[in-house]
Amino acid sequence: MKKLKELRMSASLTVNDISKLVGISPTYYWQIENKQRRLYYELAKKIAKVFNKKPDEIFFEEYK
């Protein structure tokens, strides 16, 4: 998910930083960011909260 990676990098956060903040392993987070793992809504909300965004703004391409 290109937008997710861009947000993380612009916030100067590592995969480890985000994974700790949302309570998952770094590997799990990396797999989400690289579209190798499915994302459930509750986790999407936690990740979005880190960036002060709504899940739709990060995870749905059609959101404008």
Image (cartoon, rainbow, N blue to C red):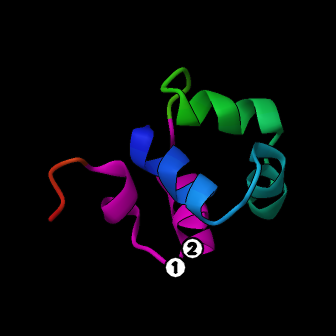
Residue at disc 1, secondary structure = loop
Tag 1: amino acid:
Asn
Residue at horizontal 44%, vertical 74%? Answer: 53
Q: Which mark is residue 52?
A: 1
Dot 1 and dot 2 residues touching (CB under 8 Å): yes
Give the magenta-colored segment's residue range: 39-60
**Is residue 47 on the magenta stretch?**
yes
Asked if 59 appears above or below 39 in the picture, the reply is below
Viewed as shown, does residue 7 lie left or right of 57? right
Q: Main secondary structure of the magenta part?
A: helix
Viewer-side residue, 7 vs 50: 7
Find the residue positioned furthest to the top. Answer: 36
C-alpha distance separating marks 1 and 2? 5 Å
> Splitting the image into 4 quarters, where does residue 36 fall?
top right
Residue at horizontal 14%, vertical 65%? Answer: 64
- Reading the image, the residue beneath label 2 is 49
How far across and down, in percent of the image, does residue 12 sit?
70, 61
